[in-house]
Image: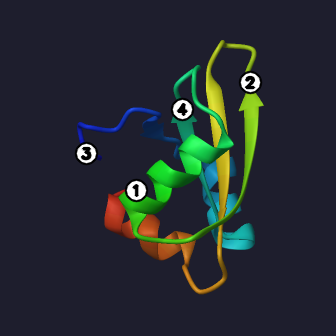
Amino acid sequence: MEENLKYVVSVLSGEKSTRLMQMENKLSFIVSKDSNKILIKKEVESLLKAKVESINIINRMDSRKVAIVKLKPEFQAMDIATQLGLI
């Protein structure tokens, strides 16, 4: 990912993240503590060149903040994950 990102820290990849990509067209990101849905949406759309439909934020027990980003139907999460080198 690009170095000048302020709110998106990294992309999550694991079994659950892969299932979300395949079944629900969602990508998972670790985000900074001071981020919110609006800031994450702007940064993800500029980074991925894809439109965001919705965002859910999870504050995990290990003190990390995770954003689950659902993409609009015309953009495929699996294709974007391939471009990012996750798959």
Residue 48: x %, y % from top left = 41, 63
Q: Disc 4 marks which amino acid?
A: Val
Considering only order in the chain, which callout, 4 or 2, is on the residue closer to the N terminus? 4
Of circles 1 and 4, the one toward us is 4
Between 65 and 54, the one nearer to me in the picture: 54
Q: Are marks 1 and 4 in contact (CB under 8 Å)?
A: no
Q: Mark 3 to mark 1: distance in Å?
A: 15 Å
Q: Which residue is mark 4?
A: 31
Residue 32 in sight here: yes
Q: Mark 4 to mark 3: distance in Å?
A: 14 Å
Q: Which residue is mark 3?
A: 2
Around disc 1, counting alpha carbons within 10 Å, would you say few (fewer than 14), some (14 to 19), or many (20 or more)?
some
Check the picture and name the quadrant holding the C terminus: bottom left
Considering only order in the chain, which callout, 3 or 2, is on the residue closer to the N terminus? 3
Q: Where 23 falls versus 58 (above or below)?
A: below
Q: Are marks 4 and 3 in contact (CB under 8 Å)?
A: no
Between 73 and 85, the one nearer to me in the picture: 73
Q: Which residue is mark 1?
A: 86
Q: Secondary structure at mark 1?
A: loop
Residue 87 in sight here: no
Between 24 and 7, the one nearer to me in the picture: 7
Q: Are marks 2 and 4 in contact (CB under 8 Å)?
A: no
Q: Is residue 74 left or right of residue 58?
A: left
Q: What residue is rendered at 73% in x and 22% in y?
A: 60
Of circles 2 and 1, the one toward us is 2
Q: Mark 2 to mark 4: distance in Å?
A: 10 Å
Considering only order in the chain, which callout, 1 or 3, is on the residue closer to the N terminus? 3
